[in-house]
Image: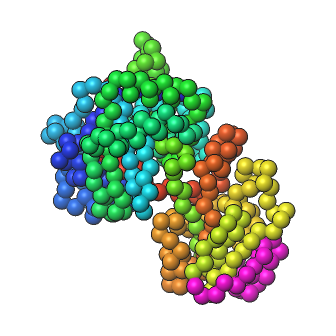
Amino acid sequence: MKVKPFKGLRPPRELVEQVESRPYDVLDSEEARREAGTNEKSLYHIIKPEIDFPEGTSEYDSRVYEKAAENFQKFQDKGWLVQDAREHYYIYAQTMNQKTQYGLVICAHTDDYMAGRIKKHELTRRDKEEDRMKHVRVNDANVEPVFFAYPDNQVLNELIMRYAQTAAPEYDFVAPIDGFRHQFWVIDNDEDMATVTREFTNMPAFYIADGHHRSAAAALVGAEKQKQNPNHTGTEEYNYFMAVCFQASQLTILDYNRVVKDLNGLTGEEFLAALQVNFIVTDKGVDIYKPQQLHEFSLYLDGRWYSLMAKEGTYDNTDPIGVLDVDISSRLILDEILNIGDLRSSKRIDFVGGLRGLRELKRRVDSGEMRAALALYPVTMQQIMDIADSGKIMPPKATWFEPKLRSGLVIHKLK
């Protein structure tokens, strides 16, 4: 893999908690408007600049992209973002529920994405790619990082832990929304930077955990700039894009659950009877029940929880897709019984990230908004890597990574 350090554009230590934000794609415009409030230093003015316009202004309005660039320049002019004098790698740690995961902030090469060495497990939509491409073009920067996993590496782990245990972090704060701790170190030793470069160069692949559209956009803008530059050499800054890379074994993937608006004309009893064709259905009572193992699902229906255990022969353990619970539930419940075939477009289904917990599933059904809820056992990082290695694509809404990367800790300028 081609990687390099970069001159990060970062907030001064005393301003980081005013600048940093959640990623652009985990909240809507009104949530961003509320979170930014009167804070003019909030990164939302760059990544969600529609908040600077009257309510209802489309985030895709051409004026909104122009405002992003205007605000980005303003942040630099006022010293809210300052570029490092020399290139660095960085370490970014996140602590959730007493568990810490450590990532290396690097620049990855667009050629590795185009050649498939940066591996994806989700489909991307062209409209979302184009939105992020416009944002990269207008700012001439990767304002937000993408989220990669890499196979465990003892050398890198030892380097990271040495900094974490002996060096004072550049940033250290608890985010107000999620309550998770975020820490950030600058790698400023040339020998350590050479070690990071060497170890990543010897790796066969990176795996996109989160940020498929940002990865595609960054690579496509880099390809555009290559064509526009008659003196292109391949070493220009625009050939690289910013990523935070975590050891695969450290990552936490939560369940990504489903709620449905109706039972496709069936009564509750008829739905349970239909499920018994492919599942062993066990009534678990009124207390919340969480799936305990692969191929077990929890169903909440009419005030009761049920265990659904997929019967032998309904899945294929030798197929990286066929073994997935998201595939089993999509085929045998959502499609076959409920006639919900296209999870990306159907208005009869919604998805609830695991951080909200199974109480959120119960609440949405009990409120009458939804008719039933289905909880899944979480996908593993090894399953994701197996699928990416096989060149296949996961079903929609299969993975929910937590904690999310905070934006605004470091930015990569393309020149």
In the image, taking residue 383 as reference, residue 278 lies left or right, namely right
Q: Position of residue 72 (x, y in %)?
A: 25, 40
Q: Check the image and name the residue furthest to the top.
A: 231
Q: Position of residue 63 (x, y in %)?
A: 30, 45
- Give the image's coloring scheme: rainbow
Determine if residue 50 is in view.
no
Q: Is residue 52 left or right of residue 239?
A: left
Residue depicted at 57% across the width and 63% down the height = 255
Given residues 116 and 158, the one toward you in this image is: 158
Q: Residue at x 28, y 44 (%)?
A: 169
Residue at point 63% right, 64% down? Answer: 377
Question: For residue 227: magenta?
Answer: no
105 or 394, nearer to the observer: 105
Q: Is residue 268 magenta?
A: yes
Q: Residue 240 lies in what quarter of the image?
A: top left
Region in magenta: 264-287
The residue lying at 40 percent from left, 41 percent from top is 161
Residue placed farthest to the left in the image?
Answer: 78
Among the 4 quarters of the image, the one containing residue 313: bottom right
Q: Is residue 395 above or below residue 164?
A: below
- Horizontal side, residue 381 vs residue 103: left or right: right
Query: Which of these two is toward me, 230 or 5?
Result: 5
Q: Quadrant of the C terminus?
A: top left
The number of callouts visible is: 0
Describe residue 264's horizontal placement relative to residue 288 as left or right: right
Percent coordinates x, y for residue 244 in the rendering: 43, 41
Where residue 391 sits: x, y (%)? 69, 39
> Which sits in the foreground, 3 or 113?
3
